[in-house]
Image (cartoon, helix red, strand yellow):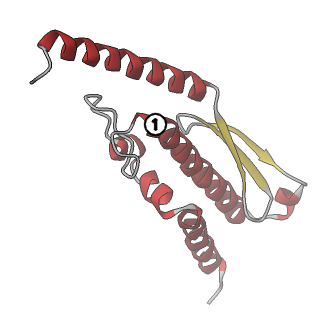
Amino acid sequence: MTEPIKERLAKAMAHLEETRQAVDHAQQQLKTATVTVRSRDRSVEVTVDSQGHLGEVKFLNGKYRTMGAAQLSAAVVEAAHQAQADMAHMVMETFRPLSENSDAEPHVEGSGIDWADIFGPLLETVDGGADAGRQTGDRLRDEITEDGEKG
């Protein structure tokens, strides 16, 4: 026998309310969340918020005073990219419990959430792990080194 429509509707409404409360809770958690990352050379520290916006940049230990502009810029970009990727991962993990399939990208049924649209290329960094962000920094450093070489 099939379940009467009123019971199915009541269950669906209860599930919808639970999901709404879970989304509200996740949003509250993320409202004040930040991620702070230091560059590999430990010269720069960058903090981003849950939207991935740059909140603070600190230049550490006076090392920046001896760095060339290109080298300092590379350190800032590296740290910012990694902080944004770490935050994207945190956001996805926060919403993962709402997922239909925890092995897949988080998906809230009927929400229309498109993680690729929200995070764009950062998803590749999240999927590839922390090494993907580090490799991007390596390529940038290689290019800066090559630009600074005299031939």
Q: Residue at x 57, y 29 (%)?
A: 30
As rendered, which of 123 and 59 lies closer to the eye? Answer: 123
Question: Where is 63 relative to 95, above or below?
Answer: below
Q: Residue at x 65, y 77 (%)?
A: 145
Question: Where is 41 relative to 46, above or below?
Answer: below
The extreme right residue here reads 61
Type of residue at label 1? Pro
Residue 16, x across and y down, in percent: 32, 18
Q: Residue at x 39, y 42 (%)?
A: 106
Q: Secondary structure at mark 1?
A: helix
Residue that badge 1 annotates: 97
As rendered, which of 11 and 147 lies closer to the eye? Answer: 11
The extreme front residue here reads 1
99 relative position to 146: left or right: left
The extreme left residue here reads 1
Residue 82, x across and y down, in percent: 60, 54
* Count of labels in the image: 1
Q: Quadrant of the C terminus?
A: bottom right
122 relative position to 99: left or right: right
